[in-house]
Image (cartoon, rainbow, N blue to C red):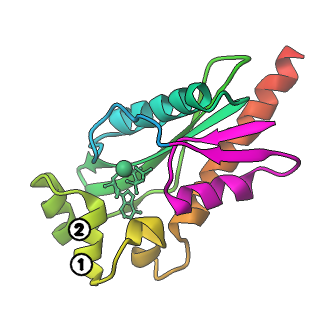
Amino acid sequence: MKIIIGSNNPAKIEAVKHAFKGNYDFFSVNAFSGVSEMPFSDEETIKGALNRAESAIKIGHGDIGIGLEGGVQETTYGLLLCNWGAIASNEHSSIIAGGARILLPEEIAIRLRNGEELGPVMDDYTNKQNIRKKEGAVGIFTNGKIDRAEMFTHLTKLLVGQYEYHRSLIK
Ligand SMILES: O=P(O)(O)OP(=O)(O)OP(=O)(O)OC[C@H]1O[C@@H](n2cnc3c(O)ncnc32)[C@H](O)[C@@H]1O
Ligand SMILES: [Mg+2]
């Protein structure tokens, strides 16, 4: 079975490989998200995940397409880090799932509200490079307890499990 991941980000690729168990071939493509570089709502982030999954399965001629998208959601408590995923298949309509969420510190949130992207802001804040491809903001702000790959692994398991459940209903 051919799984196409709609991103070349190593944290996302590692997560998808961990979440699937069995005999699968993994490929990654630079899928089109069709949303802004920094999605600013759950709605927009979900749209990005769906677009990535559906473009990945097409571009890669796969059995399954996986789209993972990071974003933020404004709330009365502050700005939440949010992540959404989608799984596209040839059998039925795409399925979505959300990842763990935490509040971003206000000094980070202010910069995002002013139009900056979280990836570069995190690198600047930590004085490190490519945080988004490594532990991610979630890893930094949870003291390394849950890194970006682990968060995406959990999210992808929610996708794969729902996919299996739907398949068992149509068989
Ligand atoms: O190559 P792609 O797949 O696009 O991976 P990405 O790291 O850019 O991730 P997203 O597009 O899904 O995330 C949207 C934006 O939010 C940033 N972002 C999201 N989650 C992050 C995290 O945990 N740590 C750092 N940046 C994050 C990311 O760098 C982008 O600027
Ligand atoms: Mg991106």
Q: Are marks 2 and 1 in contact (CB under 8 Å)?
A: yes
- Which residues are the magenta region? 1-29
Which quarter of the figure has residue 101? bottom left
13 within the magenta span: yes
Label 2, ligand 1: CB separation under 8 Å: yes
Q: Is residue 43 above or below residue 124?
A: above
- Residue in view at x 80 percent, y 30 percent: 165
Q: Quadrant of the N terminus?
A: top right
Residue at the disc numbered 1: 125
Q: Position of residue 144 (x, y in %)?
A: 51, 80
Compared to 9, does 124 lie above or below?
A: below
Q: Amino acid at mark 1?
A: Tyr
> In the displayed image of the protein, which residue is found farthest to the left?
114
Q: Give neighbour class at mark 2: few <14, some 14-19, many 20+ (Cα, 10 Å).
A: some
Q: Is residue 2 found left or right of 158 in the rendered image?
A: right
Query: Which residue is more in the foreground, 145 or 14?
Result: 14
Judge from the rendering whether residue 78 lies leftward or rightward of residue 114; answer left or right. Answer: right
> Dot 1 lies on which element?
helix
Is residue 137 in view from this perspective?
no
**In this figure, which residue is indicated by the disc labeled 2?**
121
